[in-house]
Image: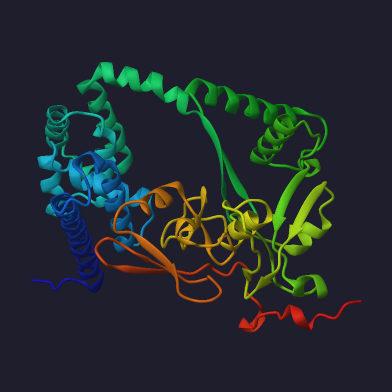
Amino acid sequence: MTAALPEQRLVEEVARLERLKNRIAARQAEAIREFARAHVASQTADGRVEPGQLEGLERSIVAQVGLACRVAPVEARRRLRVARDLHAGHDRVRALFAAGELGEYQVATIIAATSHLDEDARAEVDRQLAERRVETLGVRRIHDLARTLAAAADPDGFARRCRAARSGRRVTVRPAADGMADLTAHLPVEQAVACYATLARAAQDAAASPEPLTRGRGQVMADTLVERLTGRATPDAVPAEIQILVPVEALLDPTSPLPAQIPGHGPLPTQRILDNTARKTWRRLLTRDGIIIGGDSRRRAFTGTLAELIRARDGHRCREPHCDAPIRHLDHIHRHTHGGPTSFTNGRGLCAFHNHTRETPGWTAHVVDSTGNTVITTTPTGHRYHSTPTATITPPFGRAHDPTRIRAG
């Protein structure tokens, strides 16, 4: 018998580890479900949470799962939903998951496609998926098949959801690498296709023009979008008001490699900002070790410049560990009702989810240093999690710029 070649053994090892990873994910889902059930039982048994307050309790469970798994609340809620729905009609999919034949992402795709169905309808979709050997399909095929089967299982509900989904149209912007951002429009399909076709037609017209074309098709479409949305002849002529962090070293030394920072969107070359001819308003903020410092107020709410300082210090992202959601609320770490000041060191930016979670019994937060940079969150189970703002601009060689060393004039 010919011995297996090294690469054959390695491929077999990769396959074995993939199945093992899937089985571990399945066991984690079981543990999440068991924790959720146990936590509900313990919180309602001692009277701390009334049965009618289960919505707040679910938020608390999601937050604790997120902290334990080191993921954002959106991902934690998805994992909790998967753990719950696997036991509500998806017996065959659950068995394939536990055997390592289906991966976590594949299972989550099936759960998301059938989340609106009752248990009997899910069981029918589950049966048909197993008959079609769902474990042999790619994620995209699983996505399309599961949604098709779910629509067939509840055609009236599918029609209602399609009508209701149109109210969710929106436009969002997300930071991307190298000073770019992704502008996304969530539209009814016919509107999205019409918009894209219009931009594509503009690119075709530009290509047919007798003038030399120096831009690619995608660039023409992007420039046309900006021009038609803003009414400006060129994208660089768009005015904007931008809050920006600029390291002092970059202002004093034109050769400094340190980039500027747009809070919530990432780095941008300092020279690109200084050379830009568009009309822009900049607000420069004082930093030390790349973290914004200063600010105080006697007001009840965080407003004005103080609110802007806190948001910029926290990078316009929720301060709770592993959460990347945008800041929606400014929270008093030491509660205002307990004498906590409306100050820079006592404020932190939170998403709506984590701000509401804090109102659930058993959750506390406190500052552990005089600067207010380190905050400890304690969960109802007694676990403690540290949160520290991430430095937005790194000083050269790890040394902080000392603003007291700058001489006037």
Q: Could you say where residue 105 lies in the image, as x and y percent from the top left? A: 29, 48
- Of residue 397 and residue 296, the one placed in the foreground of this image is 296
Q: Quadrant of residue 129?
A: top left
The reply, left or right, for residue 184 in relation to residue 91 is right
The reply, left or right, for residue 325 in relation to residue 250 is left
Q: Quadrant of the C terminus?
A: bottom right
- Of residue 283 and residue 118, the one placed in the foreground of this image is 283
- Of residue 122 and residue 221, the one placed in the foreground of this image is 122
Query: Which residue is situated farthest in the right direction here?
Result: 409
Query: Which residue is situated farthest in the left direction here?
Result: 1
**Residue shown at 26% from the left, 67% from the top:** 382
Q: Could you tell me how many numbered marks the image carries?
A: 0
**Residue shown at 26% from the left, 48% from the top:** 57
Q: Quadrant of residue 84?
A: top left
Q: Quadrant of residue 106?
A: top left
Kindly tell me whether residue 105 is visible in this rendering: no
Q: Is residue 330 depicted above or below 229 in this figure?
A: below
The reply, left or right, for residue 13 in relation to residue 312 is left
Q: Could you say where residue 366 lies in the image, as x and y percent from the top left? A: 43, 67
